[in-house]
Image: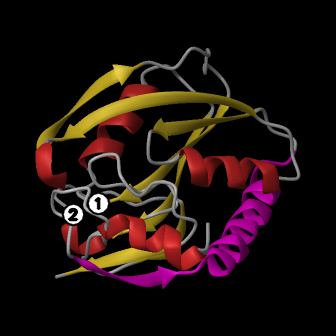
Amino acid sequence: MSRSGRARMIDSGRGGMMEGMRRKILFSRETIDSRVRDLAARISRDYEGGDLIVIGVLKGAFVFMADLIRALTIPCRVDFARIASYGGGGVTSGKAVLTKDIETSIRGKDILIVDDIVDTGLTLSYLTEWLRERNPRTLRVCAFLDKRARRKVPFEADYVGFAIEDGFVVGYGLDFDEKARFLPDVYVMEE
């Protein structure tokens, strides 16, 4: 399917908020690829000689995390956690609930949490505190996108792909109601 055909599928009668909305490319797949390689090079330098476990936050981070770990030049292990914090309509519920625990012991290990977006800061604040209780050697966060304007709690990621203004974004793993994760570019949705 052509790129424009895939992009049109966002508006193709699937209902909900996205129907009839226009989308504009915020980051192309080429721009994303270049930034992911830059982040991977920095992470590889920072963790060289360590015992790295990369923990992805499901579901949004899986595309970014897959590209990131393939670009690393150091070995790593992988695990996943899932945190529910959004209700219907893409609006945060205001509290985080762990719905999938990691399966790996992290005591004394170097931990890198990978998430799709730092928005309110609630989810990552909850997850980092929860993982700290398991006594990792180090704990850092890598976020694909950072929306500082929406913070409800102070939170800073150690590695950030792109800082963005407030706006609703989809593609490259980011979704609305489980739609549009498959898009290779990141789009901002407009009325």
What range is drawn magenta here?
21-48
Instruction: Say which of 186 and 96 sits in front.
Output: 186
As helix, strand or loop, the secondary structure at mark 2 comes to: loop
Residue bearing mark 1: 119
| Left or right relative to 29: residue 71 | right
Q: Can I make out residue 91 in this image? A: no
Residue name at image x 29 percent, y 55 percent: 176
In the depicted structure, whether residue 103 falls above or below residue 64? above
At label 2, the amino acid type is: Arg
- Residue 21: percent from left, percent from top: 22, 76
Q: Is residue 48 left or right of residue 20?
A: right
Q: Earlier in the sequence, mark 2 or mark 1?
A: 1
Q: Is residue 26 left or right of residue 22?
A: right
User: Which residue does the image show at 51% across and 63% down from the upper left?
Assistant: 183
Q: Is residue 171 above or below residue 85?
A: below
Query: For this view, does 143 lie left or right of residue 126?
Result: right
Residue 135 percent coordinates (x, y) = 53, 23
Q: Is residue 113 magenta?
A: no
Q: Which residue is mark 2?
A: 151
Question: Label 2: how many residues lie within 10 Å, few (<14), some (14-19) or many (20+)?
Answer: some
Instruction: Kindly check if marks 2 and 1 are in contact, taking CB atoms under 8 A apart as contact.
Output: yes
